[in-house]
Amino acid sequence: MTKRDIVKTLLAKKLPERVGLDEHFWPHIIDNAWKNQGVLPKTDFVQRFNLDLRNISWFSAPAPRPELISVVEASDDWIVKRDGWGASCKTWKHKAGTPEHVGFTITSPEIWKRDFREAFLAIRVRDHVDIESFKKNYATAMAGNEFVTYSSLFVFEELRKVMGDVTMLESLLLEPEWIHDFCSLVTSKYMAYYELLFSEVGLPDGLHIYDDLGYTAAPFASPACHREMVHPYHKKLFGMFKDYKLPVILHTCGDFRPHLDCIIESGVDCIQAIEAKTGMNVVKLAEQYKDKLCFMGNIDIRELESGDRDRIKQECLGKLNAMKKLRAPYVCMSDHSIPPSVTVSDYEYMLELFWDNCSY
């Protein structure tokens, strides 16, 4: 079986000849640590580590007010930028990390309607997509044997990005009409984007959608709130993908277990990254949902960071062998992304364990 065949089979909730393999890596990992361990700049990690999936696109809704884009403040180590939504975030210049929310302009439905809504409506997605470059990347990727995905953010991440966590969370309960209006328009832009790619570039093997629904302790919203305010838009976009018979991988950080039934209903075929630090365990999830979901991730990054080969072996083989015993569809990877604190040799040791034990 090709890598493409293996992942397609797993996403269909069936078992191929072996477990799948994927991984994400924090930006700047080579510059921050791995260049001193022999990894060259611009290394193709999919090729180097023999991974099964390859993503060739990234999208988030275009900002309606590009004239707002500016640098607010900067130092040698960090920078605060304001984007075309009027949102300011602080990021490191030379290493990866979660952006710090500094300030937001869209803090009420009145501001949204007065200063941003019509400008957002007027955006032509085509103007923000380099179709010819996509065609070249698509042809190259599809000629390989990896499972090829298109990727993007979606409505919950857009809400957080545009309004900030405080306004978003309060408005989910207090301003539901505003949230529905925003999500409806954002969903239309995403559907236009994917229709454009599908018709003029080609169909991928699947979609990988990023919508962080939780934090370490719990989801951001209650199951009832999620079902009312977020689920309809997941179902609409993912339903479009299903019309093209394309499988859906949903990335969500945090503990999202209370939303799992809704996630399955929306058309998701695989959940990723299943963060171990939140208390989620892929084996326990598979015991309940292995006939309804494929699982991707959950190898505790803290064990890889330890540098202790016994701990790494116990974590990797404990979950890998348990998933095989359950006959559950599984793609092995970390529970988020590989950070610079993991050495190349320890990551490659995990891969050795995987290849020696990956057959179903």
Image: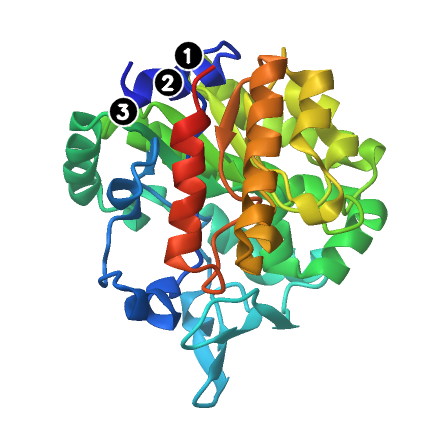
Query: According to the image, label 1 marks what residue?
Result: 16
Kindly identify the residue that appears in the image at 70 percent across and 49 percent down.
277
Query: According to the image, label 2 marks what residue?
Result: 6
Front residue of this view, candidates 311 and 10: 311
**Mark 3 or mark 2, which is nearer the start of the sequence?**
2
Foreground: disc 1 or disc 3: 1
Query: According to the image, label 3 marks what residue?
Result: 199
Give the amino acid type for the residue marked by disc 1 in the picture: Pro
Query: Where in the figure is residue 34, as x and y percent of width and height?
Result: 34, 65
Report helix, strand or loop for mark 3: helix
Report helix, strand or loop for mark 1: loop
Quadrant in the rendering for residue 297 = top right
Q: Residues within 10 Å of mark 2 (few under 14, many from 20)?
A: many
Which coloring applies here? Answer: rainbow
Query: Where in the figure is residue 201, as x and y percent of width and height?
Result: 23, 30
Left or right relative to 175: residue 26: left
